[in-house]
Amino acid sequence: MSSAGTYLKTLPYNAPSWASKLSLVPKQKISLGLLPTPLHPFTPPNLPKGVEMFIKRDDLTGMQLSGNKVRKLEFLMAEAMERGHDSVITIGGIQSNHCRATAVASKLLGLDCHLILRNSRALADSDPGLVGNLMVERLAGATIHQVTKEEYQSVGSKELIRKLEQQLKEGGLNPYCVAVGGSTPLGTWGYMEASRELVEQISDQGFTDIVMACGSGGTAAGLALGCHLSGSGLRVHAYGVCDTPDIFYSDIDALFSEIGATPEVVGGAARDMLTVIQAKGMGYAMSTEAELRTTLAVTQQTGIVFDPVYSGKAMYKMLEDMNGNAKEWAGRKVIFLHTGGLLGLYEKADQLAPLVEGLGKAHRLRV
């Protein structure tokens, strides 16, 4: 747990004993998160009878609502500081939660931050504005480098980072580069460690499943591997909000390989440790009315706000699956991992407005 004496400090990291056979084991991390995060009962609307649900509140990790990204950055930023870098580069969509979290972490640690953000062709040459995550990034002093979606597709995220790295080095900086979502072999340790925290919280309480959104794969990879190696017995369900399940399995296996978690070492591959379910709907960061109605209904009933890109989509698809396969889920005790992303709601204000107005809860007070 972070305290006044350890917050923002680099601390020795003692990996759990069940991870001792892995080849990549970090020796240190920086204390950025407000950990452990709470785990409490949670009953969203339309939860089938016979299913008991709790929610793991990783939306409350701190660092300006940075959600699951904080756990990855604790390891990544420790490496950046240890190696003497003076700046950080990362990449994502125009409303990337990871990019916003990286901007905040960089400023807290005294590093410059450069963000490559993917925008539409019509908007990439204009000022990106201050909606949602952009507000925090720009207030925190991050430098924004926009690319079009077409450029992102044709050049690729790794090459775009390499090009900016070269430019910054020519200008005298020494940048540390972070892949999309912080989903690197080292970043995977964020949710390896989170699995240890979770297992301690749920010991001997009969939990059977854990559900989460899956975007770049690092959170799902770390949690699935940690749950597997620790013998937690949890079934891991990852609801993919962008790519296909096959792509996620391949990407997660690649992360496993780079930390030495090969099938020969850990007794299984990604498909043996988690189930990936397609949940992207219309597409990444694109919301249907049904998804937003579910997001609204959950908040109206529980008081917990979900983002529309990650946890909101996962919640919508999970409830759909549970109601469509009631027998499979009957008697299960389920944890929903809330990964944060609240600021992404601001970009959906126009879509949400008629749904909220339709509640009829805003009136002129007669005085």
Image (spheres, rainbow, N blue to C red):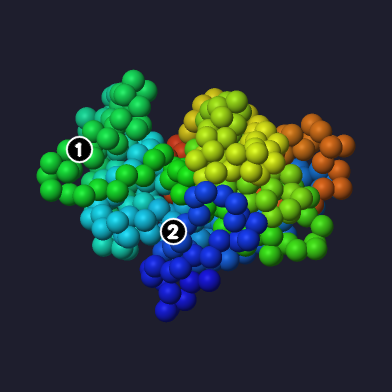
- Does dot 1 land on a helix, a strand or a loop? helix
- Residue 137, position as x, y percentages in the image: 31, 50
Q: Nearer the viewer, residue 3 or 77?
A: 77
- Residue 79, position as x, y percentages in the image: 37, 56
Q: Residues within 10 Å of mark 2 (few under 14, many from 20)?
A: many
Q: Nearer the viewer, residue 312 or 3?
A: 3
Amino acid at pointer 1: Gln
Q: Is residue 263 above or below residue 206?
A: above
Amino acid at pointer 2: Glu
Q: Residues within 10 Å of mark 1 (few under 14, many from 20)?
A: some
Res. 34 visible in picture: yes
Which numbered tag is attached to residue 74? 2
- Does dot 2 land on a helix, a strand or a loop? helix
Residue sitting at x 26%, y 54% = 85
Q: Is residue 10 above or below residue 272?
A: below
Q: Nearer the viewer, residue 36 or 268?
A: 268
Q: Quadrant of residue 350?
A: top left
Residue sitting at x 67%, y 33% = 271
Q: Which residue has dot 1 on it?
A: 166
Res. 297 visible in picture: no
Q: Would you say 51 lies left or right of 11 here?
A: right
- In the rendered image, the residue lying farthest to the bottom is 5
- Residue 145, position as x, y percentages in the image: 24, 38
Q: Earlier in the sequence, mark 1 or mark 2?
A: 2
